[in-house]
Image (cartoon, coloured by chain):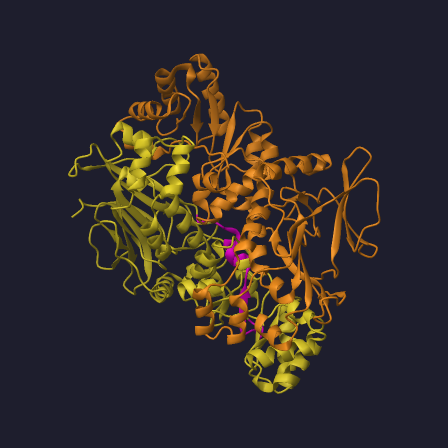
Chain colours: A yellow, B orange
Amino acid sequence: MLQAALRSGTAGRRAVFEVFARSLPAGRRYGVVAGTGRLLDAIEAFTFGPAELEFLTGNGIVDGPTAEWLGTYRFTGEVRGYAEGECYFPGSPILTVEGTFAEAVLLETLVLSILNHDCAIAGAASRMVHAAGDRPLIEMGSRRTHERAAVAASRAAHVAGFTTTSNLEAGRRYGVPTAGTAAHAFTLLHDSERHAFEAQLASLGDGTTLLVDTYDVERAVRTAVDLAGPALGAVRIDSGDLGAVARDVRGLLDGLGAPDTRIVVTGDLDEYGIAALAAAPVDGYGVGTSLVTGSGAPTASLVYKLVARADGTDPGAPLRPVAKKSTGKPSRGGRKTAVRRLDARGTAAAEVVSVGEPAPAGHDRPLQVPLVRGGEVVGREDLAAARARHLASVAELPATALQLSKGDPALPTEFAEGGPRR
Amino acid sequence: MLQAALRSGTAGRRAVFEVFARSLPAGRRYGVVAGTGRLLDAIEAFTFGPAELEFLTGNGIVDGPTAEWLGTYRFTGEVRGYAEGECYFPGSPILTVEGTFAEAVLLETLVLSILNHDCAIAGAASRMVHAAGDRPLIEMGSRRTHERAAVAASRAAHVAGFTTTSNLEAGRRYGVPTAGTAAHAFTLLHDSERHAFEAQLASLGDGTTLLVDTYDVERAVRTAVDLAGPALGAVRIDSGDLGAVARDVRGLLDGLGAPDTRIVVTGDLDEYGIAALAAAPVDGYGVGTSLVTGSGAPTASLVYKLVARADGTDPGAPLRPVAKKSTGKPSRGGRKTAVRRLDARGTAAAEVVSVGEPAPAGHDRPLQVPLVRGGEVVGREDLAAARARHLASVAELPATALQLSKGDPALPTEFAEGGPRR
């Protein structure tokens, strides 16, 4: 596409691409924007070096002039979008990329791959967080997904409210707080469970979490309290009927004089499994597979569509809305502006998406912020800001948003014709 | 775990970990080993640099002696396993890692994340390849998964029989043949569909693939043949009832004197959608989302379990089988050997997994090959070898293996007590 557009003279036409979801994953009530911070780093670093260019020309994939153009490529355009952590709905224009066609079309796969992955994880994570109520969640899914996706998944889960991660690289790279417990292999390595617990306590202190289901849970809990006393931080249960075992273990710990020792449960938990344990004496959850696979929706299915472009390459040429017209996957032309319409109490009532500027209203919260201006990243922020925004964004939604059952999106998306862009 | 084991003196005990799946994804008939080549590269590169060590010590995650140990870490043990492309079944010991506990336990997340991802993709890809029969498949899912997982997914799909990929980095890094077509944005960029087609043909030649469903399919096909004549390589249909549209387009192309112009279809295809188009005049399929998400099974759910370890750290100390004993997730102790038992015609009849060496039989095909010896990679091979092995491995299975319907694994796994290891 790039080569043909460079040759036909259309590559320099001003173009606007929008990222949106045609729908949420089946039955979900809201989506969560995540990955924005990663995307900004990636846009900044997105260039073509000698190895890439040699591959492209050596294999006849692009011609000389295209390779030359790629050799100096750096995105110089504009990006605005929903800030990280914000909730979104079908049709929400969560990212808008504007530049020449050539520079903007090259970002499609980068933008979509980062947002499709991270939004999928955050969307699932947010439901788990709300199902867990005040109890903390540990992200433990690294081994169930691609080795680099794991680091991104951990970051996205933290944006959506997970407390800690077992992925140390996510701690190093993004500052996500880390946590961990021992595996069954650690117990099996030692001559007895008692030896294993002694070794862990000697090295990590009484505040550590001991895994108690390698052989016999009751015996393990007795051994743990015998060795660490009431200062024992936590025990972890990874198998069996988690609610029933947790109740037995709670009774045992209390009876042994360790009422402050916490109980952490793990083992194929998803948002439904977490919700089902609401009444059990559980102090924290570790979640793996279902988190990193988006709990049934491993991609957010976001698309990147050309919605407007200039007729010529003059810098001042007006932008013309464009849209695919055939059956099945319609799209709406024109650059969109989005606001969240609130009622008098501050509860969200609708996602209003307008071509051009929306008619002003008293309780509209604008949703798009500048992220890249003239190729320079301007939207970088702390992960803590995204976490806080996500909490606030969910709190603003109507109560139906927190239902785990399948249903319609918590807000309707209203498409409006706005006024001319100011 | 590492720190506690270093301190308790058990870190140096010889240990054997095995990778296996407790079950296949619901209803699948076989699994596919993929990612082995990536894993060997990753094991070779797996070390801890100053930035990692500073993070670990600066945040109190490990103590000084542990950081010092990590600073010189390099895996020096043995790895053997099923060769890449081989089919596997529940309980198949697809990878065996042997070394000190410390060096082998550190590889758990690396090994599982690579194999869980790549096996999931290859397992789904193989079903699509067999559903497509002789028709080629293009991998086009990069934008629906994490940006680096996309490259690995493309490689895994190729192992399982996909012909080409739209991921150029997979072409550069792994030699996967690349292919691509234009997007709707390219047509919308131009003043008319005719202009867009002219630009593409001028740049890429008549053998290119023109996307014909931006406005009106019939008009687009007429324009395409008008411009390129019977030499037009292919047209792509991305929306509507793909079978019905393909039939109309085939008739139109034939009527316009372009019987050799191929028809490529794309648009939310999975193995079932591909199979449903078997009777339609389709010459190739492009598959995206369903491939990179494992078509409903985004992780292979492989686990990494300690199955044997020495009682002490003497180099000659015998290995003792170990296994977790509590409810829910039992495992079998002892280092396993696996063979595929064949009948007199060479058709596979069972996966036989023995602790120790299996009793010799006339038609057993050994499944494990050496991959790493004394820390040195010895199992590297061309992607072409893995592709050929996968074809042969599937061809050897009973016919039920190719059924898309949900059912039992195509082979039973028989656990046997073998003789002493020779």
Picture coordinates of residue A205, whole percent (x, y): 56, 81
Side of B207 relative to B80 (left or right): left
Does the stretch in magenta take in B211?
no
Could you tell me how many numbered marks the image carries?
A: 0
Q: Nearer the viewer, residue B108 or A82?
A: B108
Side of B327 relative to B53 (left or right): right
Picture coordinates of residue A283, whole percent (x, y): 54, 74
Decide if residue A161 is in sight here. no
Query: Considering only vertical position in the picture, is A307 above or below B75?
Result: above
Picture coordinates of residue B30, whole percent (x, y): 67, 43
Q: Nearer the viewer, residue A207 or A340?
A: A207
Q: Quadrant of the N terminus of chain B?
A: bottom right
Q: Nearer the viewer, residue B42 or A377?
A: B42
Side of A296 relative to B344 (left or right): left
Side of B142 relative to A269 (left or right): left
For residue B276, what is the image quadrant?
top right
Query: Considering only vertical position in the picture, is A222 above or below B173?
Result: below
Decide if residue A57 is in sight here. yes
Magenta segment boundaries in residue numbering:
A279-300
Q: Nearer the viewer, residue B54 or A34?
A: B54
Image point (48%, 51%), residue name? A27
Image point (73%, 36%), residue name? B398
Does the stretch in magenta take in A287?
yes
Q: Quadrant of the C terminus of chain B?
A: bottom right
Query: Considering only vertical position in the picture, is B254 above or below B185?
Result: above
Query: Considering only vertical position in the picture, is B399 above or below A363?
Result: above
